[in-house]
Amino acid sequence: MIKNITIGQYIPGDTPIHRLDPRIKILATIAYITILFFIKGFFPYIYVLAYLGTVVWLSEISVKTVLKSLKPLIVIILLTVIFNVFLTPGETIKLFGYKLPFVTKEGLYQAVYMGLRLIFLITGASLLTLTTSPISLTDGIEKLLNPFRRIGIPAHELAMMMTIALRFIPTLLDETDKIMKAQMARGADFESGNLLNRAKAMIPLLVPLFISAFRRAEELALAMEARCYRGGEGRTRMKQLKLQRIDFAAAFITILLAVGVIFTR
């Protein structure tokens, strides 16, 4: 399960999606997520599927890798589907002449609808970190937050914290995997028993994991201080962000997706 979490992971590449300006990718991701909440039927999902499929194809990231992001959240998706099936009021469904208790046509429709929304949301959002390096992501977030500096919002510090948090998710997952294997070698059991017993078995992981996280945070702080890091004031960049034709094309296609969804509501 731990190895299936793709949040925060970056896959290097030299594809059109990798070369996009991080600001465009961040805004396109926000627009994509917003568009999903405007969909009121199944037909607009065809546009979303075409948009997402094009991005995956251009990024040259395998579909298997993208779908890995769903595995850690499969329980949440299933619970959402089940709750919608049994708790949505409406016309009861008949099967072989018998009514199915608590199962309605409206519930099945809503379950499929919400399940698709979650699947598209998770897979689409995971492509942002899969195709954007942490440094580019930091620069993009900082540039987008720069206008808010006038009201006292520390744009650079916020961008740095958000990016470090994303970047350390795979690191902490690897550390958790190592701790689990070490404890399993000493007789710990994390797989047998019911869900409650498995949750209790995870408690001994928390102490060494927190110690490791604090140690890595201290090492990162010392490394940044040793390199005379003093925040965003007066900081220069080796690569300056500049919009290209491909960025305008990506923005235009995202706008077309939004227009298509709005007109097919």
Image: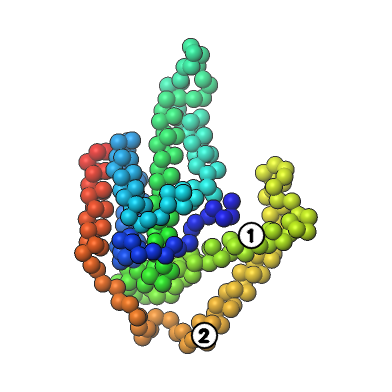
Figure label count: 2
Q: Within the image, what quadrant is residue 261 found in? A: top left
N-terminal of the pair, mark 1 or mark 2, is 1
User: Relative to 7, is 244 on the left or the right?
Assistant: left
Q: Residue at x 26, y 58 (%)?
A: 250
> What residue appears at the point 64 percent right and 67 percent down from the top-left corner?
210
Left or right of 122 on screen, residue 246: left
Q: Looking at the image, what colour scheme do you see?
A: rainbow
Tell me, for residue 177, which label it has, or none.
Answer: 1
Residue sitting nearer the eye, 109 or 14: 14
Above or below 30: residue 139: below
Is label 1 in a helix, a strand or a loop? helix
The amino acid type, in three-letter code, at marker 1 is Asp
Q: Residues within 10 Å of mark 1 (few under 14, many from 20)?
A: some
Residue annotated with mark 2: 225
* Left or right of residue 122, residue 190 in this image: right
